[in-house]
Amino acid sequence: MTATEKILKAAESNGGTITTKQVDDMNIHRTYLRTLVDKGLLEHSARGVYVLPAMLDDEFYNLQIRFKKGVFSNTSALYLLGFTDRTPIKLDMTFPASYNTSSIKNEINAHRVKKEIYEQGIETALTPSGNKVNVYCIEHTLCDILQTRYAIDIQVITDAFKRYSRCNNKNLPLLSEFAKLMRVERRVRQYLEVLI
């Protein structure tokens, strides 16, 4: 099997996406990626990310590949978890406080939080294209969007809490834990008293 065939096969088995790191790990020179782009067999999607032309470009997945420590949060998490119908204009990702986000702030809303908050409630969700990405659970996300520093539209917050109150698998004790951890207990209680 030739190097280009190996790259294309790896892209197919990876949801139509391949990265320069994956090509490096296969001990194939990166110039083959450029050759495949020139031939129209791959498209350059983002820095270090290539997709098969037949595949829809998955911005969520591309960002997850590029920023492995990033976790989709705030309105992006609401969207991925099905708690809002509004497609985010600019995607939100959260990183540990020690992570340098200065070079990526133009691409996404990059948030940094303390380690004990960052590590709690991470799960996987499917993007609209069917790829798995890291996202905060709904309980973590509901507490996130109540923090005043994010200035989330009140209608988005209200709609998310309404949908949560109708969920069969809501976890109120976990929501309470996150509310204490993020110091938004009073605001969570206000929303829940009205809805539940």
Image (cartoon, rainbow, N blue to C red):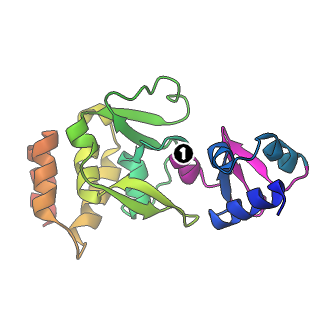
Residue 164: percent from the left, percent from the top?
25, 65
Q: Nearer the viewer, residue 88 or 61?
A: 61
Residue drawn at the location 91% of the way across and 51% of the way down: 39
According to the picture, the residue beneath numbered tag 1 turns out to be: 63
The magenta span reads 39-65
Where in the figure is residue 192, as x and y percent of width and height? 13, 59
Q: In the figure, residue 66 lies in which quadrant?
A: top right
Instruction: Report the amino acid beneath label 1.
Output: Leu
Quarter occupied by residue 78: bottom left
Front residue of this view, candidates 151 and 168: 168
Q: Is residue 188 visible?
A: no
Looking at the image, which residue is at 12% across and 67% down? 196
Secondary structure state at the residue bearing disc 1: helix
* Residue at the extreme bottom of the image, as rendered: 168
Q: Say whether residue 38 is magenta.
A: no
Q: Is residue 11 left or right of residue 140?
A: right
Q: Residue at x 42, y 42 (%)?
A: 70
Which one is in front, 28 or 60?
Answer: 28
